[in-house]
Amino acid sequence: MKSVEKHLASIRSNKKAHEAAKLRKGFSKWGGPRVVSFWKPEQVQVFVDAADEMGYHSIGTLALLCFDLCERPSDMLDLTWHNYTTHLIESVGQKTVGYFDFQCRKTNTEKHIPASTRLVERLNTRRKSALNNHIIYNDRNDMPMHVGQALHMSKKIKKYANLSDTLRMGDLRRSGLKVAKLAKQVPATQEGAVQ
C-alpha cells in the first residue's frame, strides 16, 4: 500500500507525469486519443465497400448513418426500424424519401432528419433481423450491436481497406458536418457545430 502512495506522490510532484496523466484522460470510448481526423467522402465509400465485402453490412450502414445524418455512433446504434419512416412521392416520379425520428442520447433533444438518397436505397435493401428490431445489428448472430463490437469491426475493416488508423468512427459526424457545410446543406439541428 505504501508503494502505491509513494508512486502517486511522485506522479504529483513530477509535472511531466502529471501532464501525461491528463492526456490519458482525454482518450475516447471509440479508441485512441481524441485526435480529430476528417473522413473524406471517398474514404467513407471505400470503408462501406470494404465492410460489404467482408460481410459487415451493419458497420457500413453505421458509417453512412453517422456521416450522412451527422450524428454520433452511439445514437445510430440505438436506432430501430420504428425510428425510420419512408414516403413515396409520386409527383417526383416515384421517389422514396426517408426520415429518422429519434432522441439524442447526449442532449435528450428530439431529432427529425431526412435520409440521404443512398441511405434510403441501402435501408430499402437491408435485411431485417429476425431476433431484434435494430437497424444496426451484429451480422453474425443478429443480436444488437454495442460500441465495443462496432469499434472492433471497424478496425478490421480499416485494415482490410488500407485506411489510416487515425480515422475514427466518432469522427464521421464531424466529417459529415464539414462536408455538408461546404455544400451549404447543414441540417438545421446541427448549425454552428462545425467551425
Image (cartoon, rainbow, N blue to C red):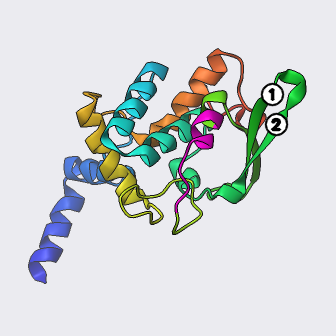
Quarter of the image with the C terminus is top right
Residue at 87%, 29% (x, y): give it: 90
When the figure is inspected, residue 42 is found, relative to residue 4, above or below; the finding is above
Q: Position of residue 6 (x, y in %)?
A: 13, 72
Q: Which residue is mark 2?
A: 88
Query: In the rendered structure, are the residues bearing label 2 and label 1 in contact, judged by CB atoms less than 8 Å apart?
Result: yes
The boundaries of the magenta stretch are 120-129
Residue 66 visible within the image: yes
Residue 38 visible within the image: no
Residue at 65%, 21% (x, y): give it: 181
Answer with the quarter of the image where residue 163 lies. top left
Quarter of the image with the N terminus is bottom left
User: At numbered mark 2, what does the secondary structure look like: helix, strand or loop?
Assistant: strand
Q: Is residue 88 left or right of residue 161?
A: right
Q: Position of residue 67 (x, y in %)?
A: 55, 34
When the figure is inspected, residue 136 is found, relative to residue 52, above or below; the finding is below
Q: Position of residue 31 (x, y in %)?
A: 33, 49
Q: Which residue is mark 1?
A: 94
Q: Nearer the viewer, residue 145 or 15?
A: 145
Residue at 31%, 33% (x, y): give it: 166
